[in-house]
Image (cartoon, rainbow, N blue to C red):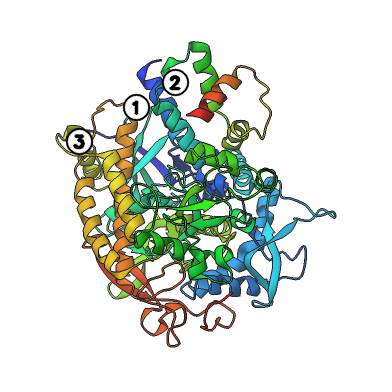
Amino acid sequence: MERAAYERLRWRCIRRALLELDITLTRFLDSGEFEKLNDEQQQAFIELADMEDYDLWDLLTGKAEIDEPRYAPILALLRKS
Amino acid sequence: MSIPVLKFDAVIVGAGGAGLRSAIQLSEAGLKTAVLSKVFPTRSHTVAAQGGVAASLGNSEEDHWTWHMYDTVKGSDWLGDQDAIEFMCKKANEVVVELEHYGMPFDRTDNGKIYQRPFGGHMSNFGEKPVRRSCAAADRTGHAMLHAMYQRNVKANTQFFVEWMALDLIRDEEGHVLGVTAMEMETGQIVIFHARATIFATGGAGRIFYSSTNAFINTGDGLGMAARAGIPLEDMEFWQFHPTGVAGAGVLITEGVRGEGGILRNSSKERFMERYAPNAKDLASRDVVSRAMATEIKEGRGCGVNKDYVLLDITHLDPATIMKRLPGIHEIGLQFAGVDCLKEPLPVVPTCHYQMGGIPTHYSGRVVMPKDGDHSSIVPGFYAGGECACASVHGANRLGTNSLLDLLVFGKSAGDSAVEDLKAGRAHRDLPKDVADKTLARIAALDNRKGGANVHETRLAMQRTMQDHAGVFRFGDMLKQGVEKILEVEKAARQLEIKDKSMAWNTARTEALEMENLIEVAKATMISAEARKESRGAHVRDDAPDTAEFPNGRNDKEWLKHTLFSPVDNSITYKPVNMQPLTVEPVALKTRSY
């Protein structure tokens, strides 16, 4: 991923509406795990990061069902980060 | 160097609740309105407000705005201005009904009215018994509010500048405000927004503390810009804290955990609340619990390497009960403390939540400051609303659900006043020749400095200093040391260095610019807190205890006054509290007890 595109994604992860997501997403990016993902997985992460805060938080905490199979492994990584 | 100039009737900085509400007034009046935001509007921190918005609609039981006013004055520990409080409480029904018309999906009663629920501190008949006054949209009130207002703005042709950061307020020699300089994050380009009216709605600055429930975005940008432009900050010593946030993260742990039998312990596993509140123990009021926790930490009985937190123990409770009655707590423990709370206690610390002080405003939303002997002289062209402003309705402590009301009422009021002033003929004034020099110099200094201070380390030093020296329970000696320490941190904050010099999406630069705002707020808070020698509302000092002469440590004779911190020379002046409401009798001083 190009630097500018990554930095834009980073900004959208480290400045969320909810503190819970600020912490979770910042930690994930800082852990270097994002770079280890393949293109399809990176795309899945980008889609998750693009969600409304409560929608993403509900997926992370299991309050909402994951209806997109590509998201499951990424959400699992986010929970561990 | 030529800087692009964009001309608008009004520029609004911040797209949370207050910014969006004021933008509606301006755009619907046909004025060309720009809204700048560091993030997409529905990612603003207003989203996190779950509780509801207070309005004495009386849908569930009898209610009256004068009762709401009484509760707000009492909640403020009589530091709130009673004209502003009357204005807000009286306007509450109107702004809530307007929001309903914008499409806000409020919870409903069976007969279709807005459903109202009780909330702490809201009472009927001047403090007699709890009343149902909070209007909510499930547990997503702030979120739903932003969506409704954003849509309304789109319809009204408000022009949004998303992922732009305002950097400095533009003032001319006569003190008029003419707009802001701002940076487009995508390109790093600096642009001048030249406006007839400038409205700040930038939210709070809770990130000055090490433990804060505030999202990372709450860096007090409006307060920093105002301070750099020589505008004083009011009542910055007053910050609301929650007793139990996850240590190191800030994520809130509901008070229900103690309600279900959770026990607070210190480093020797002692149930310390037995010493502070022998009867209520861990179920004592929020203030008492926070104070006890702060005292344990101050006296060296905290836990961890830095001895800076205590433990909340629920390991003795039945795991099935925890999972059923306290949903989410297990997940929060795992995710943010790395602790399985069924097996180990959770690290917790009193955590900053809301800023009562801010940019001084009249209840019309116009910014005011001392000039020629008048302590509330209007700063022409400048308005503010929401958490960044101090009207002052929250005084020394805010009542729950009054924050969303504040941003609706004063967002609208700031917008209305701007419309009124512009229609009365306020024109674009000439930009000063050196209009962007200070901004460009700040950016250049960041880009060129070598051997300067690290942003992350400086922020951490500031947050630790604020948490240790000006936290929920304050000690005279610690505050004195805190002033020296924060002035040291300020020196570092004036000498920040960034490694990344690129133009596009330079988040390192943005974070450095945010740090320059945070330090203004931190300094104002510490110096204002050290100076106020009484206890009042959320400002509680060990050396101003509860006595017969000064109940709760409050000293009205000497301290019934607003603090004004001047960023120009770090000095403090005071101005009187307005005890005279607009149309009703004043709420007379008495001891605040619940």
Give how far across and how far down residue A51 sits, in percent.
57, 30
Q: Amino acid at mark 2?
A: Phe
Looking at the picture, do discs 1 and 3 lie on one chain?
yes
Work out how far the residue at label 1 is from the one at label 2, CA to CA, in angstroms. Answer: 24 Å
Which image quarter is the C terminus of chain B in?
Answer: bottom right
**Which residue is found at the position 43% from the left and 38% from the top?**
B38
Give how far across and how far down residue B502 sits, in percent.
27, 25
Work out how far the residue at label 3 is from the one at label 2, CA to CA, in angstroms. Answer: 32 Å
Q: Chain of mark 1?
A: B
* Between discs 1 and 3, the one toward the N terminus: 1
Which residue appears farthest toward the right when viewing the image? Answer: B111
Give how far across and how far down residue B587 sits, in percent.
56, 81
Write down the residue under mark 2: A34
Looking at the image, residue A5 lies above or below residue B421: above
Q: Quadrant of residue B408?
A: bottom right
Work out how far the residue at label 1 is from the one at label 3, CA to CA, in angstroms. Answer: 16 Å
Write down the residue under mark 1: B187
Q: Secondary structure at mark 2?
A: helix
Which residue appears farthest toward the bottom when viewing the image? Answer: B549
Write down the residue under mark 3: B444
**In this rendering, position of residue B120 left or right of residue B461:** right
**In this rendering, position of residue B472 left or right of residue B432:** right
Q: Nearer the viewer, mark 3 or mark 2?
A: 2
CB-based contact (under 8 Å), mark 3 and mark 2: no
CB-based contact (under 8 Å), mark 1 and mark 3: no
Q: Chain of mark 3?
A: B
Q: Which numbered circle lies on residue B118?
A: none
Q: Amino acid at mark 1?
A: Thr
Looking at the picture, do discs 3 and 2 lie on one chain?
no
**In this rendering, position of residue B346 left or right of residue A66:** left
**Which residue is found at the position 53% from the left and 55% from the top?**
B407
